[in-house]
């Protein structure tokens, strides 16, 4: 697509497996396009941009991009990053049992275990944990976690995720599995 509005229409029409977009586009910039797509879909998004400042990268990741590549970049790097993102998305996201080192999450039996120790979670905590574990290392924004837990994300409730994360951390102790990425969101690391 040659501009953001066409990109949004194409994303809705084509339902792609992955989207690679520039940040600087006419009509609707890549940040707004990413936000619009995130309201409707969890399709992986890789942003390409000449904006190299750390704050630009954090904003891109915070609004929902799965990766952020700055120009100049090599075609090989882009292909490698696309493969990594697709591997993350296709690998564990649909699995009935997600395993990351000593942690397992069983969707069928609604059960989480850490080193064979069962952890009792609320349904909301379970969905947050499943989302985080589905793509270890990926940073999820509060809105993305709200959407995963409740099927909808309201900006006025995004701080509620902090309470759920606090409760999850307490239940997962002494392991520090959920990492805060300040100003961006949370990620799972075993």
Image (spheres, rainbow, N blue to C red):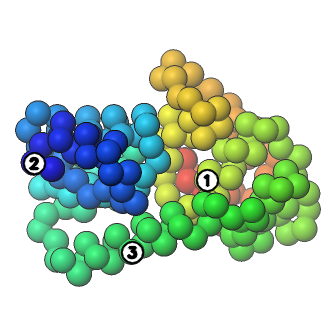
Q: Which residue is mark 3?
A: 83
**Rendered position, 73 above or below 178:** below
Q: How many neighbours does mark 3 have within 10 angstroms: few (below 14), some (14-19), or many (20 or more)?
A: few
**Rendered position, 62 above or below 146:** below
Residue 161 screen position, x and y as percent: 62, 33
Q: Label 2 to label 3, Cα distance in Å?
A: 24 Å
Residue 63 screen position, x and y as percent: 37, 40
SS of the residue under disc 1:
helix
**Residue depicted at x 25% and y 40%:** 9
SS of the residue under disc 2:
loop
The reply to whether discs 2 and 3 touch (Cβ–Cβ < 8 Å) is no
**Residue depicted at x 40% and y 60%:** 17
Q: Residue furthest front?
A: 13
Instruction: Using residue 32 as the reference point, say whether residue 88 is left or right of it.
Output: right
Q: Label 1 to label 2, Cα distance in Å?
A: 34 Å
N-terminal of the pair, mark 2 or mark 3, is: 2
Q: Which residue is mark 1?
A: 132
Q: Label 3 to label 1, Cα distance in Å?
A: 20 Å
């Amino acid at each position: 697509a040659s501009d953001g509005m066409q990109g949004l229409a194409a994303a809705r029409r084509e339902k792609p497996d992955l989207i690679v977009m520039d940040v600087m586009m006419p009509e609707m910039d890549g940040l707004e396009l990413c936000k619009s797509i995130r309201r409707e879909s969890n399709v992986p998004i890789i942003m390409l941009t000449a904006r190299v400042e750390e704050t630009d990268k954090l904003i891109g990741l915070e609004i929902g991009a799965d990766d952020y590549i700055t120009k100049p970049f090599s075609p090989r790097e882009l292909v490698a990053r696309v493969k990594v993102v697709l591997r993350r998305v296709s690998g564990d996201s649909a699995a009935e049992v997600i395993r990351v080192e000593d942690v397992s999450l069983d969707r069928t039996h609604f059960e989480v275990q850490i080193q064979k120790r069962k952890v009792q979670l609320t349904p909301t905590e379970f969905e947050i944990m499943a989302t985080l574990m589905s793509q270890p290392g990926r940073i999820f924004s509060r809105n993305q976690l709200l959407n995963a837990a409740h099927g909808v994300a309201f900006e006025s409730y995004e701080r509620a995720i902090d309470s759920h994360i606090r409760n999850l951390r307490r239940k997962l102790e002494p392991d520090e599995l959920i990492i805060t990425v300040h100003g961006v969101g949370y990620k799972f690391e075993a």
